[in-house]
Structures are given as structure tokens and as C-alpha cells.
Amino acid sequence: MLCMVSCKRIIAIVAGAVLLGCGIAAWVHRPDAAAAGGKSGLDSYCEQALVRTYLPSMQGASDAFYKEYFKESPRIEDFNTSVKEITKQGGPIEITFVASPFLGAHNSVGVDEITFTVGEWGDVNLEKFSHVISYSLPEHLLGLSIKAIPGRYE
């Protein structure tokens, strides 16, 4: 349990440093982003750093959700995950990610929104896990399915 608390605290400290660094870097580096019509390389790196910091926590939340639906846990990686929003109302910071977990050779099982809160003392908590959309598996992966995920399919 001590390791879990320490790991969560380390994740929160790193995430805080990334957010602070990205805020400063984005403020200094804005002209490049505006000229490119989107995120600058630096903004993109900041988002990627934040996503990578939270990958173990996102994977854990995903594993807990999908264990009743698949024999194998769908993977979440940085290339199929983005930051949807970061907000702060009062004390904790809320970070919401959008992920497309996959099985096999990048066969997405759907789209998930995963929200964490980061407290003032570095405590990171899973606030909400929402499975938004499901995708049907290709024929060769149907053997990994335990039961259908309820909800909307595309």
C-alpha cells in the first residue's frame, strides 16, 4: 500500500511539473503554433509527456473495466490517447483523457474517456471511467470476447 501511495504521489508530482512546464513553454512558444494552425511541436510534446505519465493509471482503469468483456486486456498507448481537457474548480485539478484501447494489431475496441483528479498534495484518483462507443471485433479476434459490451456500437 505504501508503494501505491508513493507511486501515485510521484505521478502527481511529475504531472504537476509537466503541466507547469507546458504552461510556461506554451506561453513562450505560441507564435509557432498560431502560424502552423495547431499545436506547436512543444505543445505536442507536453501533451505526449502528460499522456505517458498517466498511461499506467489509465491502463489500470481500462483493465478493471474490460476484464468482464475480454479474456485479454485491451492496451492503451500514447499514440491512441489524447488530453481532452484540463480544468480546475477549487482544489483539485481534473484531467480527462480520450483513449482507444485495442486488441491484436491495433484493432480498437472502442473509445473511452478517463478522468483523474490531482489533489494539492499530489494524490491522484480515478474520478470517472466512461466507455463512450464500442467497435465490433474482427472475426479473428472474436475468441477473445467473453460477452458483448453494452451500449452504442459503431
Image (cartoon, grey):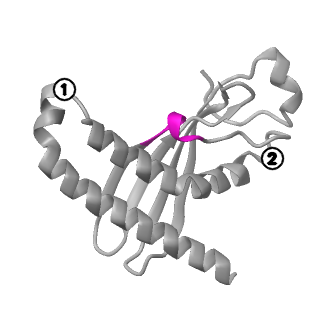
Q: How crowded is the residue under tag 1: few (<14 C-alpha within 10 Å), some, or many (20+)?
A: few
Q: Please report the residue visible at 36 percent of the width from the left and 66 percent of the height from the top.
A: 16
Q: Which quarter of the image is occupied by the C terminus?
A: top right
Residue reaching furthest to the top: 139
What residue is rendered at 67% in x and 40% in y? 75
- The image shows residue 154, relative to residue 71, as above or below, that is above
- Work out whether 77 lies above or below 59: above
Asked if the magenta segment contains residue 38, the reply would be: no
- Start-end of magenta stretch: 77-82
> What's the residue type where badge 1 is placed?
Ala
Residue 83 image point, x, y percent: 40, 45
Residue 36's label in the rendered image is: 1
Name which quarter of the figure residue 100 lies in: top right
Left or right: residue 87 compared with residue 49? left
Residue 32 position, x and y percent, is 15, 34
> Compared with residue 118, is residue 26 higher up or lower down, i.e. above or below?
above
Residue 10's disc is none
The answer to whether the residues at label 2 and label 1 have Cβ atoms under 8 Å apart is no
Label drawn at residue 68: 2
Q: Residue furthest right?
A: 143
Secondary structure under tag 2 reads: loop
Q: Determine the image quadrant of residue 69.
A: top right
For the residues marked 2 and 1, what is the alpha-carbon distance in whole angstroms?
44 Å
Instruction: For the N terminus, give its image quadrant.
Output: bottom right
Q: Secondary structure at mark 1?
A: helix
Mark 2: amino acid: Glu
Task: State the residue at coordinates (61%, 56%).
Answer: 56
Of pointers 2 and 1, the one earlier in the residue sequence: 1
Frontmost of labels 2 and 1 is: 1
